[in-house]
Amino acid sequence: MPRLKLTIEYDGSPFSGWQAQPGAVTVQGELERGLRVILGTNAPDNINVVGSGRTDAGVHALGQVAHVELPELPELDPYRLRGSLNGVTHHAIAVKDLQLVDNSFDARRSPHVKCYEYRMLRRHARGGLREHQAWVVKSDLDLLRMIEAAKIFVGEHDFAAFRSSDCNAVTTVRTIEVCELFRRDTELISLVVHGRGFLKQMIRIIAGTLMEVGIGKLKPGEIEGILASGRRQNAGITAPSYGLTLNWVRYGVGVV
Amino acid sequence: MPRLKLTIEYDGSPFSGWQAQPGAVTVQGELERGLRVILGTNAPDNINVVGSGRTDAGVHALGQVAHVELPELPELDPYRLRGSLNGVTHHAIAVKDLQLVDNSFDARRSPHVKCYEYRMLRRHARGGLREHQAWVVKSDLDLLRMIEAAKIFVGEHDFAAFRSSDCNAVTTVRTIEVCELFRRDTELISLVVHGRGFLKQMIRIIAGTLMEVGIGKLKPGEIEGILASGRRQNAGITAPSYGLTLNWVRYGVGVV
């Protein structure tokens, strides 16, 4: 069966996350429903849109990637299919790109690097125009200390202290290739993290921990000890989901 | 009476614009309602929040500025008042700054420069994460030609061709200090315009005209003739309101 690669942008606010679940509106569920509507009687019993990974409820994506196998149909032109999908799915989803790929391509298993961005808005007021796309932090943040702490996450580490208590990954060793903070404007601070894979809520716990460094509750020098302890309670709080965006996923051998 | 200066961010989507109108939810109306709630029995008959200018329905602001006069009350600490206002107004409004100013300060009449940004998203899909904050343009845009055309707007011109048909400004001569286009990412193009004042829908008509230059419907060399004609029908379409954001307003003598 032909295999298609989808690049998808979505506002995570209205969705119960990526993963399809009965009785909940999810991004995967919407894409599968849309394909069933378009294929009609040609729809196979099981349409499975496989994402590069799950995103939690409220998390956004500028460039999530997924693949799906569809029956061979002469009328299935990828360009038209993308248009149809954008016509029938939830308006907060935009299928930006859709192309035929080799059947060896697997959005989840093919080697790839993901880029996540976590946005913190330093202000006393609410989020305003960025209400659902940034975490409002009401205390002063010492960006230089946060940058110092962020560097410690780079490289291969056991991130057992930086995963949610219900994460059931077998191994907790992950590699972070980039972990950088920068000021986007007078109020907005972005944390950008690149890596091949992350534990459940790992980026959000790193963001919450760096926020605690920023407000002076933790010192940059304490990060190594938290990693070594492997204990979730030693790390900072889990930053809220709506501050997080999956910016892009890049595939290829030896990708960085 | 003490005069306060407010700096306000808002997501324009839920509002019928800035200006208070009976039976409509507006930003000015929300701020005045919030102040009446907070002042209670101390509220004067007429609370008038004066903005630097009106924004149309759907237009956003990162830094709209307004002033208001309130009765002298010992408990009216600006810092606490800002918190209270953020607590009682519509959640899409964020009062970012509130301070006591000299009674000579007038958000509308004091000399100032405004910066507007118009965002165009070049893609075939819907807006996704930027659905309500950018205009989706489905044709290829030639950015270099758009930049060439944008330069022609800089300086003092009669913008009669670039105002809505119901604009009732007495004079149509305005000065644009900056009119620049730049690529924010692979899809997003921003138009940034600075000036002391604009006619009704002037920025949106400039944006629509530059889009038409971008798709090849108009040539950069035609802009001068459109300005000279003074006829609205010669300019391009009015770009939709939700692509526009009032980024900031800067006050001061000789400000640029």
Image (cartoon, coloured by chain):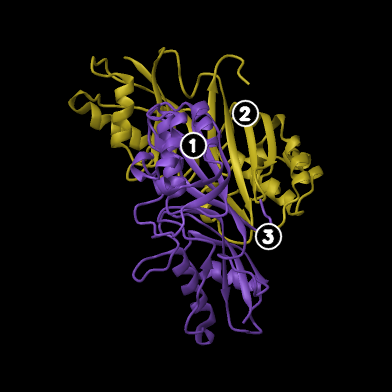
Chain colours: A purple, B yellow
Q: Are marks 2 and 1 in contact (CB under 8 Å)?
A: no
Residue bearing the label numbered 3: A252
Q: Are marks 1 and 3 in contact (CB under 8 Å)?
A: no
Query: Gap between marks 2 and 3, in whole Å?
Result: 47 Å
Quadrant containing the N terminus of chain B is top left
What residue appears at the point 20 percent right and 28 percent down from the top-left corner?
A: B40
Three-letter residue code for mark 2: Gly
What residue appears at the point 42 percent right and 46 percent down from the top-left corner?
A: A162
Q: Which mark is residue A24?
A: none
Query: Gap between marks 1 and 3, in whole Å?
Result: 41 Å
Three-letter residue code for mark 1: Ala
- How far across and down, in percent of the image, does residue B8 sit? 43, 31
Residue bearing the label numbered 2: B195
Q: Which mark is residue B61?
A: 1
Judge the density around disc 3: few (<14), some (14-19), many (≥20) Cα neighbours within 10 Å. Answer: few
Secondary structure of the residue carrying tag 3 is loop
Whether residue B73 can be seen here: yes
Please tell me which residue lies in front, B103 or A233. A233
Spot the residue most to the front: A228
